[in-house]
Amino acid sequence: MATLRSVNVGLPKDVSWQGRTVHTGIWKAPVDGPVMARKLNLDGDGQGDLGGHGGEMRAVFVYQLGAYDHWRKFLGRDDFTFGQFGENFTVDGLADDEVCVGDRYRIGEALFEVTQPRVTCYRVGIRTAEPRMPALLVQHHRPGFYLRVLQEGEVRAGDEIVKVADGPEAMTIAEVDGLLYLPGHPRDRIERALRIPALSPGWQGSFQAILTAPANGNAGLVDAAPPPAWPGFRPLRVTAVEAESTTITSIRLADPDGAPVPAALPGQFLTVRLRPGLVRSYSLSGQPGGTGYRISVKQEAHGEASGYLHTHVRPGDLIDTAAPRGSFVLRPAPTPVLLVSGGVGATPVLAMLHALAAEKSTREVWWLQAARDSAERPFATEVAELLAGLPHAHSHVWLSRPAPADKNYDTNGRLTADLLRTLQLPPDADAYLCGPAPFLTGVTAALVEAGVPAARIHTEIFGARPGLTPGIAATPARPPHAPAGEPGTGPAVSFARSDLTVPWPADCGSLLDLAEACDVPARWSCRIGVCHNCETGLLAGSVTYDPDPIDQPAPGNVLICSTKPSGPVVLDL
């Protein structure tokens, strides 16, 4: 019979790591005597990052003595102590290739249910002093697992672990873990996992994404999009330059030989290289599937690229262009759709409106647009014509500082939650938002307050996306810059969204390390090629991996945590 060998708890604390401060609860220590197991955790225990750990479905983490023995032999170490893998329960038995999701166990006075494998992150590498550990846990099929507490009660070291129910579908922790993180993702096994009621909502969402997203990369870990239509950059010819407002100009691009260009999905963007080191991305605003592309560019006060496009580009010019990309795309559905924009953020949602009009959609469509005044509001006539062709269209326009002569708008002021509530928006709508970061934050909160579920709100931001640095203490934000010290002598690395190109330093460990040294916002969690949080579009160039990722990223993407450039590269960061 399985036995609870140690009960381990610990409250979050700050630890120093690579010159940064990490707030983490992974340090656990054995407890003598009884401990109360409650719905959210054990008494005396806590989590530092509630986004990735803790909560009702992850109340108690379990790891096995058999796994400890395995790592001692594999790593040649004898310094492990109970709680070292962040577990609350160190157990004798309950191997990951035997325990199934949905199994129920009585331990002491409490009743538990198995909900999911561990989601690995870099902090287990810190705690075990082995940076490879997030990957090793998956590769060796020894992740450990979480329990939720069905019946609260006291537990203590030495308690017998009594199995009281088998999980439906009989899918082990090791198998479920491999379905998400390892290559293959067999559809029939994923469908089977989704029939397990006890599987946590997060894992259910990941598996649903794998089944419904394009077969391109690991959709369970990162938003999926079709692969780019061509590698790197190719020249496209400018066929027209058109003013859309006092600050926004559209540029139409086509194949120089007159061939049709590959269709973009509504909401995607193009990346243009105006000269070496000057690379920018702009949303597509025209009808998807047309003979060419249209990008619409706002002239920024000190924008080098936008200034060049507004003042130097003429019909007949050639511009190096990367293929359409992006996962902010209109998803087919029968539900109502909200297209919400601020300023030049109208560009990707206008492409979505074009797509809906072209298919004569019967969906309820809401066009919600905010601008400073009519002179700065782009596409007013174009939008009105498209909405007129849709049977269930609604429109509301906010102008924050309308001029006395402005007429074609609905509200004088900013878009607010109170105003959105008066519109009686359909609560089952899918919302697509684009605009500056403060606009997105405010409108997302306003839509949630107005009754739209957060899971149905999709956003696209101008410039660099927000970083994800789990557990890292916040520091004052700095604009992207060249790394400190002597400039590198390696190939050029361009961060397209951050308007930065720097030479590769020979002593840099990875593209992620370089991004951090330049204060380029990046997303990461494991730092060893498992979680795919760092997956980034490789717009041009090639890279080498060390170590190889456990599951390859989508074609045209790279995992920056474990790559170095093998020549000049352009990243969608």
Image: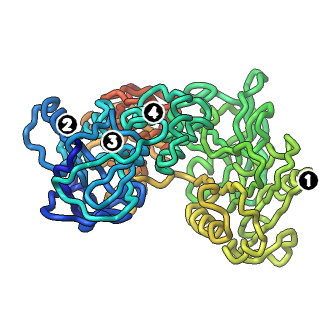
Between disc 3 and disc 2, the foreground one is 2
Task: Name the residue nearer the viewer: 548 or 177.
Answer: 177
Residue that appears at 23% across and 42% down? 1
Residue hosting label 2 = 66
Image spot of residue 97 (x, y percent): 33, 33
Image spot of residue 528 (x, y percent): 32, 37
Q: CA distance from mark 4 to mark 2?
A: 22 Å
Q: Residues within 10 Å of mark 4 (few under 14, many from 20)?
A: some
Between disc 1 and disc 4, the foreground one is 4
Residue contact at pointers 4 and 2, CB within 8 angstroms = no
Q: Amino acid at mark 4?
A: Leu
Q: Amino acid at mark 2?
A: Gly
Q: CA distance from mark 2 to mark 1?
A: 64 Å
For marks 4 and 3, the one nearer the N-term is 4
Task: Name the residue nearer the viewer: 545 or 445.
Answer: 445
Residue contact at pointers 4 and 3, CB within 8 angstroms = no
Callout 3: helix, strand or loop?
loop
Between disc 3 and disc 1, the foreground one is 1
**In the displayed structure image, the side of residue 410 where residue 176 appears, left or right:** left
Instruction: Tell me the number on the disc at residue 179.
Output: 4
Res. 299 image quadrant: bottom right
Q: CA distance from mark 3 to mark 2?
A: 26 Å
Residue hosting label 3 = 527
Between disc 4 and disc 2, the foreground one is 2
Residue hosting label 1 = 391
Q: Amino acid at mark 1?
A: Pro
Callout 2: helix, strand or loop?
helix
For marks 3 and 1, the one nearer the N-term is 1
Image spot of residue 255 (x, y percent): 73, 26
Residue that appears at 85% across and 52% down? 382
